[in-house]
Image (spheres, helix red, strand yellow):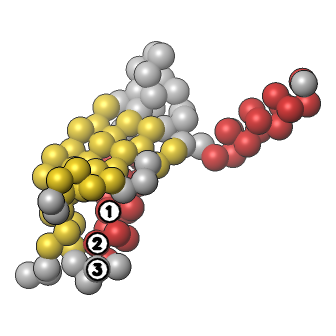
Amino acid sequence: MMKTFAVSAAALTLCGCMTSAITRMDGDTYMVSKTSAGGGLVTAAGPTADVYEAANKFCDEKGQVVETVNLVAQNGVPFRAANARLQFRCRKPG
């Protein structure tokens, strides 16, 4: 039991944080979110960069670019990890 817990804890530490799958909200609007595993007092810069990276990859695969609809980013504080949530659309470049 203790060995299983130790392996699980190590895996979570190595994973760092979790980016959600890109989810269609409605029509042509999508959402992706990320929560840092850093705990309190970590800035939201990392999760914000990661959600934009995921959105850019998603839109690039369609030959399009990201258009931000809404971004909510929160720095970490005690008992709440830093996080970012991006709502976006993919649009033709230019």
Tell me if 20 is positioned left or right of 65 in this view: right
Seen in the picture, residue 74 relative to 87 is either above or below; the reply is above
Question: Do the numbered discs 2 and 1 sit on residues whose CB atoms are within 8 Å?
Answer: yes
Q: Which residue is mark 2?
A: 59
Residue 38's quadrant in the figure? top right
x 27%, y 55%: residue: 24
Q: Nearer the viewer, residue 29 or 82?
A: 29
Within-10-Å neighbours for mark 3: few <14, some 14–19, many 20+: few
Q: Is residue 12 visible?
A: yes
Q: Is residue 41 visible?
A: no
Q: Nearer the viewer, residue 21 or 51?
A: 21
Residue type at the position of mark 3: Lys
Tell me if 18 is positioned left or right of 45 in this view: right
Q: Residue furthest left?
A: 94
Question: Do the numbered discs 2 and 3 sit on residues whose CB atoms are within 8 Å?
Answer: yes
Q: Secondary structure at mark 1?
A: helix
x 41%, y 33%: residue: 82
x 33%, y 41%: residue: 84
Indicate the position of residue 52 as horizontal and vertical percent values. 32, 58
Residue type at the position of mark 2: Cys
**Disc assigned to residue 62:** 3
CA distance separating discs 1 and 3: 11 Å
Front disc: 1 or 3:
3
Q: Which residue is mark 1?
A: 55
